[in-house]
Image (spheres, helix red, strand yellow):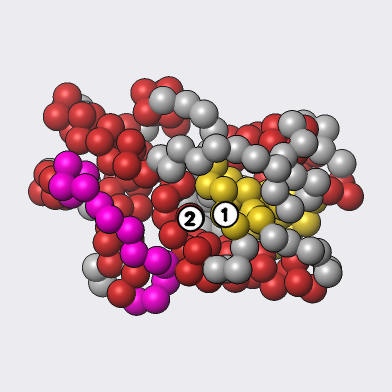
């Protein structure tokens, strides 16, 4: 049973992961693959709002998604977007990436290969991956402007949509750990982390929310 303290600490980390960027039209929208089809839904919605004329869905499979999305995250995202009325001609698929760094690097290479003129990227992720996605893109694709975005929902709404509190909290904790350790490895830019988020992170780790921590962290 998830305790009230666990949920309060997770809320603190959730709030930190949110970037609160103002949405604006960009050259391309990039939907980062994951277990959450909501990313595809939101990317399609942004397309219909006229925020990007082109979409790239990126992602292979992972232990979390291989049963849910056997054809690969990006392929399933594309199928969802097509169902939502996005034309096939507006979607590119990058189906090899297995982590956020590869999402960015391989998407960039794909867009260069097709000759797309990219000056800005609307980067669409899960709500608790906004900051990690932004920090990674700023490191690996520094010449473009990055707008980090996700489905607009509260922490409680997201918990309800996933239906597994521990899984979500584990992922929140894992995403923050990477913000702490990956800059020194050259994987992303460094960002300040408030004491409130660090304290919440340490309490959750102490209480066993560790399944998504990088093993060498």
Magenta stretch, residue numbers:
185-198
Disc number at residue 146? 1
Is residue 190 on the magenta stretch?
Answer: yes
According to the picture, the residue beneath numbered tag 2 turns out to be: 134
The residue depicted at 70 percent of the width and 43 percent of the height is 25
- Residue positioned 27% across, 61% down in the render: 180
Q: Residue at x 47, y 26 (%)?
A: 153
Q: Residue furthest bottom?
A: 185
The N terminus, quarter of image: top left
With respect to residue 182, does 24 lie above or below? above
* Residue 12, visible in the rendered structure: yes
Q: Depth check: 72 or 192 in front?
A: 192
Quadrant of the snapshot with the C terminus: bottom left
Give the overall secondary structure of the magenta segment. Answer: loop
Is 159 left or right of 47, judged from the image as shown?
left
- Residue 42, compared with residue 74, is above or below; it is above
Q: Is residue 29 left or right of residue 125?
A: right
Contact? badges 2 and 1 (CB < 8 Å): yes
Note whether 75 is above or below 5 in the view shown.
Answer: below
Work out whether residue 74 can be spotted. no
Neighbourhood count class around disc 1 (C-alpha, 10 Å): few under 14, some 14–19, many 20 upward: many
């Amino acid at each position: 049973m998830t305790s009230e303290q666990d949920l309060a600490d997770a809320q603190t980390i959730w709030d930190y992961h949110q970037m609160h960027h103002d949405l604006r039209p960009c050259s391309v929208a990039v939907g980062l693959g994951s277990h959450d089809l909501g990313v595809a839904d939101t990317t399609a919605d942004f397309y219909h709002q006229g925020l990007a004329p082109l979409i790239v869905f990126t992602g292979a499979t992972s232990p979390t998604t291989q049963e849910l999305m056997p054809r690969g995250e990006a392929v399933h995202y594309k199928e969802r977007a097509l169902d939502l009325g996005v034309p096939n001609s507006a979607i590119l698929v990058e189906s090899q990436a297995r982590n956020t760094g590869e999402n960015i690097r391989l998407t960039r290479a794909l867009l260069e290969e097709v000759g797309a003129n990219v000056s800005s990227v609307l980067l669409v992720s899960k709500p608790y991956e906004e900051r990690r996605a932004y920090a990674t893109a700023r490191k690996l694709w520094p010449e473009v402007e990055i707008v980090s975005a996700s489905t607009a929902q509260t922490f409680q709404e997201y918990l309800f949509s996933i239906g597994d509190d521990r899984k979500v909290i584990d992922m929140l904790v894992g995403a923050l750990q990477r913000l702490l350790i990956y800059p020194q490895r050259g994987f992303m830019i460094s960002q300040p982390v408030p004491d409130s988020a660090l304290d919440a992170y340490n309490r959750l780790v102490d209480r066993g929310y560790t399944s998504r921590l990088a093993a060498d962290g």
